[in-house]
Amino acid sequence: MDRERILLTPGPLTTTLQTKLAMLRDWGSWDADFNAVTARVRSSLLKVIHGEQSHVVVPLQGSGTFSVEAAVATVVPREGHVLVMDNGAYCKRAAKLTSLMGRKCTVLDFDEAAQVSPQVLDQKLAQDPSITHVVMIHCETGAGVLNPLRDVAMVCEKRGKGLIVDAMSSFGALPIDAREVRFDALVAASGKCLEGVPGMGFVFLRKAILDQCAGNSQSLAMDLYDQYQYMEKTTQWRFTPPTHVVVALAEAIAQFEAEGGQPARLARYTDNYRTLVDGMARLGFMPFLDPSIQAPIIVTFHAPGDSRYDFKAFYNAAKASGFILYPGKLTQIETFRVGCIGAIGRVEMQQAVHAVELALQELGIASGEPAI
């Protein structure tokens, strides 16, 4: 194959050549030039959510999940009680890591084909005043649901509870305004909608709670309060930073800003989503979610009802045409997922639909129509 395969996944994503080229140079982790790149990245990230006045941003080595774990451990006191709103696989992961860190954790279950409910949250917080913090996944990519961040934040603020938001798959694409939505922590990562490469997470912490975070974390490496204090004092990372990831992110952010920032990225991803869904519909495929709660990030499709369908064979056929799909994350029915994000546009999405059509033909399947 002449070109790189296109990743139709929720991250890592397809990146631009400029972003790849940024990683060809080696950087000294304590060097002033590299520290200036880190500072520039942090400043740019704050601007994305209009958080310059209200929040600080703390980068952390590792995948996004590292930063979710770090955020919970840093923000929630050891005697705290966390409520996780669960409508998917990544919510369940948040609940698991919360419990593993010794925090009391209660899970509020919702259907994976529905949004979490601010009204049900309000009732639960009224019933159990011992809850101190709420964790919510903004875009639950297990199915692709967009959860109502603003309404959940209003409930938490009214009830005086801390809110930790996993915005891994929404940050940079979906609007988040710290001037209008109150959260104690918001977590995202380099390899998602900013279109950098994976390896660095970052957490926005509300300035008003910073002093309360000291000593909460039981981890040395993942203590965001210590990471923040050290960075402010020295401009350096406490431990070896992912230098190539950071400079690639700086380049990706420059492209993000040149494109027009969050509104422009949302417009491109929305066009990708519509191109995908319309094209797949022509092949008989049915999305799992109601369009009213679907984020234009990743789409879950019902598997074809044809008995010849096998995901692995289907995946390999699409891969041979240059496209990497994603397996389903749901438990009750067979699905697969197709991402709409990354350095791709309408043409690539049209080509992806054609690759799916060729895969069906190879498997002898006449239509993607599900069995239901």
Image (tube, helix red, strand yellow):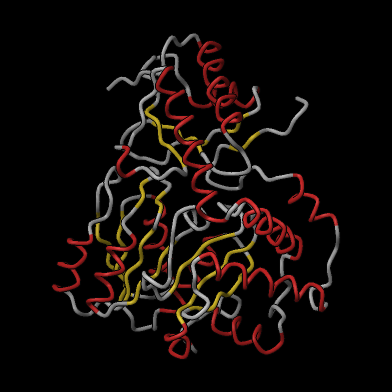
What residue do we see at 50% from left, 52% from top? 263
How many numbered discs?
0
Residue nearest the observer in this picture, 351 or 228: 351
Residue 177 appears at what percent x and percent y?
A: 43, 66
Question: In the figure, residue 247 lies in which quadrant?
Answer: bottom right
Please name the residue shown 55% across and 78% down the image: 224
Using residue 293 as the reference point, say whether residue 187 is left or right of it: right
Left or right relative to 199: residue 276 = left
> Residue 9 vs residue 26: left or right?
left
**Which quadrant: the C terminus?**
top left
In the rendered view, would you say 83 is above or below 310? below
Q: Is residue 108 above or below residue 131?
A: above
For the residue pair 342 and 5, the one nearer the viewer reads as 342
Residue at horizontal 35 percent and vertical 62 percent from the top: 136
Residue 339 position within the rendered picture, expressed as x and y whole percent measured from the top left: 51, 39
Nearer the observer, 61 or 79: 61
Quarter of the picture holding the N terminus: top right
Counting from the top left corner in percent of width and height, residue 207 is at: 47, 84
Residue 149, image x and y in percent?
A: 34, 61
| Residue at 36 percent of width and 73 percent of height | 182
